[in-house]
Amino acid sequence: MIYLSIGSNLNSRFGNRFDNINKSLQLLKNKKLKIIKISKFYETPSYPNKNLPKFINIAISINFSKKPSDLLKITSDIEKKMDRVLTPNNEPRTLDIDIIDFKKIILKTKLLELPHPKAQERNFVLMPLYEINPNWKHPINNIKIKDLINKLTANKRNEITRLKEGAILES
């Protein structure tokens, strides 16, 4: 299984943060990725500057028959289509799509590291991922996702809010 984290904290020409994520799901589907599960929306403060707009994030599981580099090309193209401008790390963005886990492959290239190198320390990755697969284990250290969540600081566990709304994927 392949897991992606999708987030937004800026409006775009497509709409607000929620619209951006919904549009990205449609674009992924249009690229012939089979979306299996989608988490609810989760909201977190921006990090490290909590004065910046809050992020909305989801996790999705997908089926994809090509290579990780092919998926990275697709996700990068979608980010560009959604008006993402490359900015320094942790700056606001219209859309961010991260490959968290690609079929348990361990890979490190200039362009892509799998699993995502910071997945295990990010509440906005772990909580939505737990929702769609509570049995997921980190591919490198084999630690269960519940244990990774429990390793987060109390502040990190408390500052994330699961929203009632879910993403919308048109048929």
Image: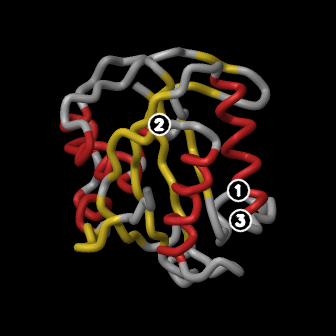
**Which residue sits at x=63%, y=20%?**
66
Mark 3 vs mark 2, CA separation in Å: 20 Å
52 displayed left or right of 160: right
The residue lying at 48 percent from left, 48 percent from top is 5
Find residue 164 and report its horizontal and vertical position in percent: 23, 73
Left or right relative to 121: residue 90: right
Q: Nearer the viewer, residue 30 or 85?
A: 30
Q: Residue at x 50, y 65 (%)?
A: 22
Counting residues from the N terminus, which is met first, the one under dot 1 or under dot 2? 2
Q: Secondary structure at mark 2?
A: strand
Which residue in the protein does label 2 denote? Answer: 34
Amino acid type shown at disc 1: Glu
- Quadrant for the C terminus in the image: bottom left
Please, what is the three-letter code of the amino acid marked with disc 3?
Met
CA separation, marks 1 and 2? 18 Å
* Residues at discs 3 and 1 in contact (Cβ within 8 Å): yes
Tell whether 163 sits left or right of 9: left
Colouring scheme applied when the structure was drawn? secondary structure
- Residue at image position (60%, 82%) is 15
Above or below, 107 against 56 in this view is: above
**Residue where numbered disc 3 is placed:** 82
Residue 133 figure quarter: top left
Q: Quadrant of residue 121?
A: top left
Number of marks: 3
Residue 137's place in the image compared with 93, above or below, is above
The residue singled out by tag 1 in the image is: 79
Q: Quadrant of residue 140?
A: top left
Q: Give the structural element (helix, strand or loop) at label 3.
A: loop
- The residue lying toward the viewer, choosing from 125 and 76, is 76
Residue 6's disc number: none
**Distance from the alpha carbon under mark 3 to that under mark 1:** 5 Å
